[in-house]
Image: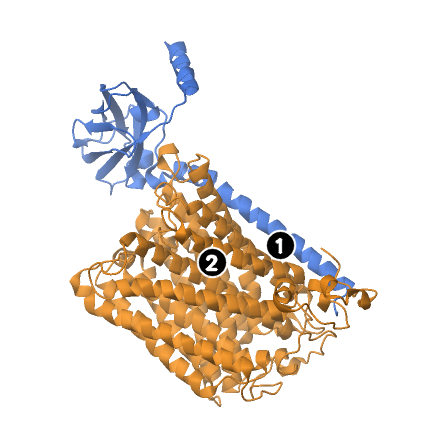
Amino acid sequence: MGIDRAQRDGVNKTVIRSVAALLGMFAFAFALVPLYDVFCKVTGLNGKVDTTAQAIVHEEVDQTRFVTVQFITRGSAGLPWQMSVATRQMRVHPGQTAEVDFTFTNNSAIESWGRAVPSVSPSSATTHLRKVSCFCFQEQQLQGEERLTIPLVFQLAKDLPEEINTITLVYTLYPVQRTPLQTAYNNHLAGDNT
Amino acid sequence: MAPKLPPHNPLQHSSTAVAGGQSHEGHAHHTPPKGLLRWLLTTNHKEIGSLYLIFSLTMFFVGGIFALVVRAELFQPGLQLVEPEFFNQMTTMHGLIMVFAAVMPAFTGLANWMIPLQIGAPDMALPRLNNFSFWLLPVAFALLLSTLLMPGGGPNFGWTFYAPLSTTYAPASTTFFILALHIAGISSILGAINIIATILNMRAPGMRMMDMPLFVWTWLITAFLLIAVMPVLAGVITMMLMDINFGTSFFDAAGGGDPVLFQHLFWFFGHPEVYIMILPAFGIVSAIIPTFARKPLFGYASMVYATAAIALLSFLVWAHHMFIVGLPLTAELFFMYSTMLIAVPTGVKVFNWVTTLFRGSISFEPPMLFALAFVVLFTIGGFSGLMLAIAPADFQYHDTYFVVAHFHYVLVPGAIFAIMAGVYYWLPKWTGHYPNERLAQCHFWCSIIGVNLTFFPMHFAGLAGMPRRIPDYALQFADFNLLSSIGAFFFGASQLLFVLVIVLCVRGGQKAPAKAWEGAVDLEWSVPSPAPLHTFETPPVFHRAQTHE
């Protein structure tokens, strides 16, 4: 067969390089997951908001413009909770601190854990929405038939882009699976804090 | 990797049992194993090429039958024949089978057969790996098809398997689907490595890169695309596997994941994937048009650069499949313009083909007919692609039959017509006989009528708002769907002619000389027809003047 040593070496080199490229791309696919998260956090794309409390910035309230903030709440399969909001929409000035009450109701007789995951639309408003206190920062526990009202305190940054006059905040409820160990650990943490 | 040097004593390998797949390695040609074992163990690029092509043709009919189930259900409004759940499985399986089991293996089969012949190599660089990459395919697709018989049915989430439809809400068989796709992916990756190794290292002495026939060039670039994006697909389906079975939440918003991330990752693979299915077609057409126009290809170098440009741009356009997920305006604009930019190198190609035809001495043998139909109909598919690239307009077209019409125009009279053109072009080299001219002409005219009758009305149905992947539709779409269904059955039936022509051609027919077509120039026409099992065992002398200058 007309394949000589030089060709064989060349083939080996090509194969090694191809396999290296291959493994690199496989790793790249997984690296894209954290990169995507970082990218979204920085740019506020896909409406993912910071899940830690931010301080209120005392800045002059921009009385000249009104922004409509809408609230949408959604349940989820597998969690027998209902989530409702005191007002469907409110009008605020940029820079003004506002508060709105959300009510969680556990419709079942069993205690369960859940979490409300927020999303902001349009995504360009995400980085201009400061949440001072939000139930979305942590998982909630509701006893059977319990009803719990928690306020959301937020502020729109004054530098909110001109063209945005409506912001929609969506909260989707998701069940949280808790092992007894996790529950004990969380109780322990809660005990430390008080 | 075992060295592929000639055995010291060829006689040692003369018994059938020992010879196995190595029977072709020595200079002394002994009898290969008989029957099934011969095909199971073969390391010969021509035999493996034939296996790929036969497998692909079989799967073309399997996928075609799934499509006909869909078209039969859509023949008239209302639910007649199948349950909606089964309809969803049929649309999904049709897509998966046609993409991964029909079009891709067909091109790999043609590459196996023709690349060593076109560059003057004795075989592929890694013959045993070649055998392995083929035999992975029947395993993968037996597994995939078996999901249809499992409780809960097969994949029903569309060939794009968007999460969480394919994770949280998927049938129980999804893990098998993931496994099947992994195996098929490994097969294409191994095939791609083999093709790159062959093209870069095994060319006849004196053949520079810029002397290679365009089919070789386009396949080289395709193989690079495969190596770049198949691992991303493997990554995505691995994440799905973990989301389904191991409680991770890559794509599950409840656990902090993001379903839109799935779409980004999928289309980062998916868009280069659609070019994987069309670039080798460009190569085939670029071989056939000069042959039957009896003129050298116009703009050889620009063809190479245009192919490379299309391949590079394919990495920058993925989000044009996701215009309505809520991208920021800047991203919409970026992906809109980068997508439109692809029309430039593609236009270069189309104009080069047209210019090659200009003042040529053209004859219309079956390969040429399919190649010409390719140029015209692929361009129509390209234009509807440009319409879809307009982000604001896409909000109207998204997920309608307009999209279905678009990608079927680029894949059926695009990729598949080019494969058929290639088969008709190289059949004399493979079998030593010309295909039956009258039957082949009949196949062509039936196909072209069938294809247009099936897919052209879909443009109108889509523009009028008919959504894709739904088993029922509003009454105003009834006429378009009736035409499409008639066309689909006509097109499907006329493919039986294709099988008939191939079978007849293998069994006999008008004898073909080594140079079967008057205007053909590449190296494969210097070996006898039919090509003997072993060719170019001593490298041929490559004359530059005979090709592209």
Hey, which quadrant is residue B196 in on the image?
bottom right
* Chain letter for the blue part: A
Q: Position of residue A117 (x, y in %)?
A: 32, 32
Left or right of residue A4, residue B269 in this image: left
User: Horizontally, is B25 left or right of B83 in the view?
Assistant: right
Q: Which residue is mark 1?
A: A18
Q: Which residue is mark 2?
A: B272
Callout 2: helix, strand or loop? helix
Amino acid type of disc 2?
Pro
Question: In the image, what residue occupies the spot 83% across and 64% down?
Answer: B8
Q: Chain of mark 2?
A: B
Q: Which amino acid, mark 1?
A: Ser
Instruction: Say which quarter of the image contains residue A2.
Output: bottom right
- At x 34% / y 42%, what residue is drawn? B169
Residue lying at 56% horizontally and 59% vertically, measured from the top left: B224
Coloration mode: by chain
Give the Cα distance between marks 1 and 2: 17 Å
**Residue B341 numbered mark, or none:** none
Residue B54, compared with residue B258, is above or below; it is below
